[in-house]
Image: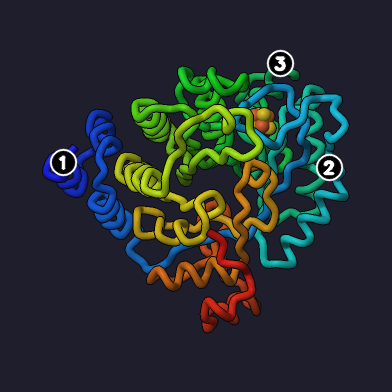
Amino acid sequence: MSNTDIQPILERVLGGERMTVEECAALLASHDVARIGVAADEVRRRKHPSDAVTYIIDRNVNYTNVCNVVCTFCAFYRRPGKPDTYVQTIEQICERIDETIALGGTGVLMQGGLHPDFGIEWYEDLLRTLHARYPDFQLHCFSPPEIHNIHLISGLTYEEIMRRLKEAGLYSMPGGGGEILDDEVRKRVSTKCTTDEWLDVMRATHKVGLRSTATMMFGIGDRLEHRVRHLRRVRDLQDETGGFTAFIPWTFQRENTALGRRIKEEPTGMDYLKMLSISRLFLDNVEHIQSSWLTQGLRLGQVALRFGADDMGSVMIEENVVSAAGAHNTADEQMLRYLIREAGFRPQQRDILYRHVNREESAARDASDSATLRELTVAFAD
Ligand code: SF4
């Protein structure tokens, strides 16, 4: 599609009108990423007029790698009974939380495989124990596939499960396991919950008063129309519940995965920036769009801040799932602050609900705010 063809779409959206799915498909088919990015940057500026770009200090804890379904894009899971399976103890999880708190962290993102023996009580015990020990620490845990697995094991409705987990200390839920919300794609690559089940878990989560994020992992054999349907389903549910805090798209990481060995094409940096920008323009009811430096590299993750993203994501003290599939990028707080500042913004720590966090003491923060890239100790990974 030529530039002149997409210009009226961008003008309509910048004029405050809602993008149609046909227009979304037309933008996805366009190669004019720069023009789409400028429009997304403008919408980002209107929604977030201050010069702050946020980041969070937390870590991913993967309490088990045992999983009773198969996703061909996953390099993390192990089938039940295999020798290299693990389940972390409470003490191991607490050690990680203590380290996170020492680094100024405000919460933990905890997810695991779909363990065939873990019913609701296992998750309630875990949350209750952690919440009793760390009452102010935000437990941002699980994902729709894990909730669906509890539903299969315990025979409870999604709403009952979410209510009980909330009572046990769950603070919010990550939008993991979204991949592409279209069964034509999902069923080819995974035996986990369907599109409707994923959406129903999120609906129940929001209904009991918890917030969540929504994600998209593209490049798993999906075509443009599948990506459009995914965005529409997220926007529709957000119209209904208003429960999504943020949308986080990223690209499939292929290393060590069965799907990666089969798939011929993978998304480029341009595809990522285009998807991110279109997410900002299409999801007019979602406040925050997050850059995924972990999967895209620090440089492209920084550029994303001018393509519609207003958040740099997590310092990610620990991550095991996408790193098993080849994403080896690392950063610390100094580095994220540096990248945000060099993109022309003011770095601002936040919590899981995007509220600003102002720590009194932060040697890392203060050092980074006068540092040059050369002085920073973390490798500037590609
Ligand atoms: S992505 Fe999640 S549900 Fe799928 S195999 Fe990996 S751990 Fe299991």
How many tags in the picture?
3
Q: Is residue 59 visible?
A: yes
> In the picture, which quadrant includes the N terminus?
top left
Q: CA distance from mark 1 to mark 3?
A: 53 Å
Residue 155's tag is 3
* Image height of 324 relative to 260, above or below: below
Task: Check disc 1 and report its element: helix, strand or loop.
Answer: loop
Earlier in the chain: of badge 2 and badge 3, it is 2
Q: Nearer the viewer, residue 159 or 183?
A: 183
Q: Which residue is mark 1?
A: 2
Q: Residue at x 52, y 70 (%)?
A: 337
Percent across and percent down for residue 301 are 47, 57
x and y, in percent, of residue 118 in the image: 79, 27
Residue 162 visible at all: no
CB within 8 Å, label 1 to label 3:
no
Q: Position of residue 78 (x, y in %)?
A: 76, 30
In the rendered view, does 85 fall on the left or right side of 27? right
User: Where 75 falls versus 34 (above or below)?
Assistant: above
Disc 2 marks which residue?
A: 88
Residue at (72% x, 60% y) in the render? 100
Graded by Cα atoms within 10 Å as few (under 14), some (14 to 19) or many (20 or more), the crowding at tag 2 reads few
**Cα gap from disc 1 to disc 2, whole angstroms:** 53 Å
Q: CA distance from mark 2 to mark 3?
A: 25 Å
Which one is nearer the viewer's eye here, 115 or 236? 115
Could you classify mark 1 by the number of other residues whose Cα lies within 10 Å: few (under 14), some (14-19), or many (20 or more)?
Answer: few
Decide: few, some or many residues near mark 3? Use Cα within 10 Å; few <14, some 14-19, many ≥20: some
**In what quadrant does ligand 1 lie?**
top right
